[in-house]
């Protein structure tokens, strides 16, 4: 047994002497790394010797598919600049370094050192396995920030050995967790810049990005914190009320716009008011004043107004970026000046002497208190002005509310053009613009089961735009509606589209009717629509009545004449037969 073991060892030694022994090892590297394949010999003992590196198994002579060769002092040939000898060749370090390895560099490599004598060459063989990895993290920077958009850019990074196929963008409110972030994946590997739209003004957001290849997703980029710029308010002041205080003043109260519609810090309010002339159905010129925004319930008193006059008031909230839409209320009348009509009355006074005024036909007296006032007393012939040492007892006139005549635009009518995967194409037809030109449109959409109070997205359009294409990243069923805006306010909501995205071969669309939650605007629009209907229905009814009367009168005349008459309807035309000519009709 011992003899057999020694015999096997002798055979192995003889094989090494005849063919040369080959040592081998395996190395695993990732794409993009620099990899060094070790190979050494004793240059002090053998002197400087020539060495070659090749790909594949080491043959009996030289190197197969040679990639580099040295004469023992320097490199005399190499296949690519990526192949280097970084060690000290003079002491026998002939290790091969491959820079930025790729998956194609995987395979067997052989090092052969030419040692003088038969079967003396030193041979070292290695197996290199290069694997792809996830892309490197991106470095993102802010390029531009506006009221509703943020543009970011980045520099291309190492793709991990597999082409980058997409980028993912996470966006969240600054105070929220990343679990609430909205994630969007963009399948355009050539991108180096991206603009995020439909953001809320004056809000702070966190943004991060990821690169994706077939191996996986990179680590997170740096996190950007961006704050969008302020914009003019989107909503009007709320709960606007007018109250007549005297014959020359009106008190106006209101609340700020909804918090999500302020779009920044409210600086002030613009109050515009003007007198309405009911006789000519016209307005006087606007008068303006400004009030600083200080609290949640604002008020101002409009003074120096005319008595018994109707006034219209408009309030707009102001940020550093501009003026928002107006809040309107019905017309309000100042109180009447006190007029007392009497033919006979008795004056009572707290003093010893009462003031008595007489005319040619009647005597009038006044019950008074302590302050002075001017009283108009009318008898049967004239008005008499009386200055007394006291005021009359308080006479209160009721606040008179008039009908508002200014009107926001009618809502547009939106229609579906196409739904393809997550892409929605819409177009709309504008309605009546109201008392002021349309200044724009905005589109709201939300999940079908959600409330409109939790609108998912709001997109704004110019007044000349009548169609759009929307990319909704998350497939689901949504409600979509649209509003028109002018300087006087916002229209009622349009019809509602219910659209399902992301379903292959099926796109669900329902058109619903909705009612605006803006009570002021709704009342104005309803009154306008009633006026339009009346303007159409009344002339039609009158015309039908006239035609019926004339027809009955003519038939009665014909019946009185001799002969007979027959009429029937054939192919939608009137036929006549009788002794009277047709012209009689």
Image (cartoon, grey):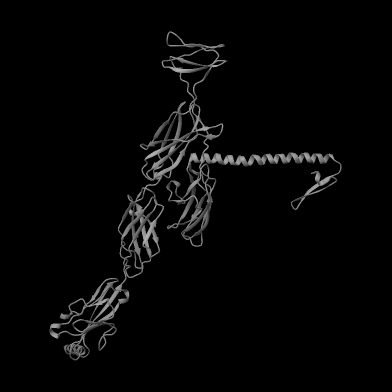
Q: Nearer the viewer, residue 325 or 281?
A: 281
Residue displayed at 51% across by 20% down: 339
Seen in the image, is 92 located left or right of residue 489? left
Residue 194 is situated, as x and y percent measured from the top left of the image, at 38, 59
Tell me: residue 333, above or below residue 556.
above
Tell me: residue 335, above or below residue 286.
above
Outermost residue toward the right in this view: 562
Outermost residue toward the top in this view: 352
Rendering quarter of residue 80? bottom left
Q: Nearer the viewer, residue 8 or 106?
A: 106
Residue 171 is situated, as x and y percent measured from the top left of the image, at 36, 55
Residue 308 is situated, as x and y percent measured from the top left of the image, at 50, 27
Residue displayed at 21% across by 91% down: 18
- Quadrant where the image shows the C terminus: top right
- Quadrant where the image shows the N terminus: bottom left
Residue 298 is situated, as x and y percent measured from the top left of the image, at 39, 35
């Amino acid at each position: 047994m011992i003899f057999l073991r020694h015999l096997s060892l002798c055979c192995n030694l003889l094989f090494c002497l005849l063919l040369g022994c080959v040592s081998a090892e395996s190395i695993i590297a990732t794409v993009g790394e620099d990899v060094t394949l070790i190979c050494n010999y004793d240059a002090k003992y053998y002197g400087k010797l020539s060495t070659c590196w090749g790909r594949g198994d080491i043959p009996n002579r030289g190197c197969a598919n040679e990639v580099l060769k040295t004469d023992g002092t320097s490199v005399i040939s190499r296949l690519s600049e990526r192949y280097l000898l970084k060690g000290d060749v003079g002491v026998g370090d002939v290790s091969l370094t491959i820079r930025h390895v790729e998956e194609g560099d995987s395979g067997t490599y052989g090092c052969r050192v030419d040692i003088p004598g038969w079967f003396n060459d030193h041979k070292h063989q290695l197996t290199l396995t290069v694997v792809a990895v996830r892309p490197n993290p991106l470095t993102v920077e802010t390029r531009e920030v506006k009221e509703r958009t943020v543009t970011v850019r980045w520099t291309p990074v190492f793709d991990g050995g597999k082409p980058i196929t997409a980028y993912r963008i996470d966006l969240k409110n600054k105070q929220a967790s990343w679990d609430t972030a909205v994630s969007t994946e963009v399948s355009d590997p050539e991108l180096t810049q991206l603009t995020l739209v439909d953001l809320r003004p004056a809000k702070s957001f966190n943004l991060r990005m990821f690169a994706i290849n077939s191996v996986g997703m990179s680590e997170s980029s740096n996190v950007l914190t961006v704050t969008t710029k302020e914009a003019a308010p989107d909503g009007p002041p709320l709960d606007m009320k007018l109250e007549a205080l005297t014959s020359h003043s009106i008190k106006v109260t209101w609340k700020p716009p909804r918090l999500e519609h302020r779009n920044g810090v409210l600086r002030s309010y613009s109050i515009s008011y003007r007198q309405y002339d009911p006789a000519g159905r016209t307005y006087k010129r606007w008068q303006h004043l400004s009030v600083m925004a200080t609290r949640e319930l604002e008020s101002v008193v409009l003074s120096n107004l005319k008595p018994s006059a109707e006034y219209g008031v408009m309030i707009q909230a102001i940020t550093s970026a501009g003026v928002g839409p107006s809040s309107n209320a019905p017309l309000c009348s100042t109180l009447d000046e006190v007029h007392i009509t009497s033919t006979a009355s008795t004056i009572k006074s707290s003093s010893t002497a009462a003031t008595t005024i007489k005319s040619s036909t009647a005597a009038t007296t006044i019950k008074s208190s302590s302050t002075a006032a001017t009283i108009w007393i009318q008898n049967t012939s004239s008005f008499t002005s009386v200055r007394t040492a006291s005021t009359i007892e308080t006479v209160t006139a009721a606040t008179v509310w008039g009908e508002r005549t200014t009107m926001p635009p009618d809502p547009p009518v939106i229609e579906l053009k196409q739904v393809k995967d997550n892409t929605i194409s819409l177009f709309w037809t504008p309605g009546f613009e109201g008392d002021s030109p349309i200044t724009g449109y905005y589109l709201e959409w939300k999940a079908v089961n959600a409330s409109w109070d939790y609108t998912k997205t709001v997109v704004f359009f110019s007044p000349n735009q009548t169609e759009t294409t929307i990319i909704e990243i998350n497939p689901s069923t949504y409600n979509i509606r649209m509003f028109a805006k002018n300087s006087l306010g916002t229209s009622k909501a349009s019809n509602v589209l219910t659209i399902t995205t992301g379903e292959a071969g099926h796109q669900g669309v329902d058109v619903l009717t909705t009612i605006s939650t803006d009570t002021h605007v709704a009342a104005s629009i309803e009154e306008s629509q009633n006026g339009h209907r009346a303007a159409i229905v009344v002339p039609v009814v009158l015309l039908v009545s006239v035609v019926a009367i004339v027809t009955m009168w003519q038939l009665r005349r014909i019946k009185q004449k001799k002969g007979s008459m027959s009429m029937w309807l054939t192919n939608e035309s009137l036929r006549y037969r009788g002794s009277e000519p047709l012209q009689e009709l």
